[in-house]
């Protein structure tokens, strides 16, 4: 570790490689399940890399490494405990229940229709578009829409009917 602290790259790579079996033993000794041992090794190596300048050469490297490995093992156990409480492995659970959101193909189809309709409405003249937006999309009454737009109910009704005729023509249903 002293050579690694001094900048010897080969020594540092050798040190990290040689630490792996030791870290694995410490993790298993802490009771880390075998499928999480590699995670603890990775976290420990990352911590060694980040804290390598804090190592005091007058002290035992093995004790320093053991302390870091034990703490990462405890962190791994905590993380695994939280994960096991929230997540379960039931591959058939997804296949046994219908999606409450409905058919994804139908949802995509509806989104496509909404985009086409919005595009068609966007092509209408301003007054016709306002009539459609207020009367159909916002669900306002003729009186409410007239108040909101500052136009008469008769003018809105004419624009509404012209908009419907224009939309039918755009969709080829005239």
Image: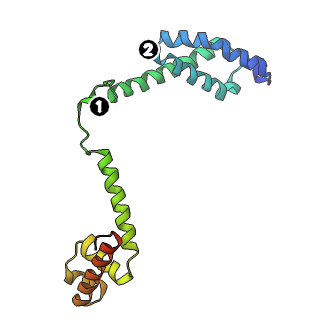
**Residue 153 percent location from the top left of the image:** 22, 88
Measured Cα–Cα span from mark 2 to mark 1 = 26 Å
Horizontal side of residue 18 vs 139, given as left or right: right
Q: Is residue 15 above or below residue 100?
A: above
Q: Is residue 136 above or below residue 146?
A: above
Q: Is residue 136 above or below residue 64?
A: below
Q: Which mark is residue 33?
A: 2
Q: Nearer the viewer, residue 97 or 30?
A: 97
| Helix, strand or loop at mark 2 | loop
Horizontal side of residue 112 vs 8, given as left or right: left
Residue at image x 38%, y 81%? 125
Residue at image x 61%, y 26%? 46
**Residue 86 percent location from the top left of the image:** 33, 30
**Residue 17 percent location from the top left of the image:** 67, 15
The residue labelled by disc 1 is 94
Q: Quadrant of the C terminus?
A: bottom left
């Amino acid at each position: 570790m002293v050579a690694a602290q001094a900048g010897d790259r080969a020594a540092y790579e050798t040190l990290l490689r040689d630490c792996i079996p030791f870290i694995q033993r410490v993790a298993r000794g802490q009771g880390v399940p075998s499928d999480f041992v590699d995670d603890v090794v990775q976290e420990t190596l990352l911590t060694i890399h980040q804290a390598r300048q804090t190592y005091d050469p007058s002290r035992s490297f093995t004790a320093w490494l053991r302390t870091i490995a034990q703490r990462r093992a405890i962190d791994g156990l905590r993380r695994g405990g939280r994960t096991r409480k929230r997540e379960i492995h039931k591959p058939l659970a997804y296949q046994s229940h219908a999606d409450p959101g409905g058919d994804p193909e139908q949802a995509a189809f509806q989104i496509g229709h909404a985009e086409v309709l919005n595009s068609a409405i966007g092509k209408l003249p301003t007054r016709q578009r306002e009539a459609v937006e207020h009367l159909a999309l916002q669900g306002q009454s003729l009186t409410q829409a007239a108040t909101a737009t500052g136009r008469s109910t008769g003018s809105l009704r004419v624009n509404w009917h012209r908009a419907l005729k224009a939309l039918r023509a755009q969709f080829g249903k005239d």
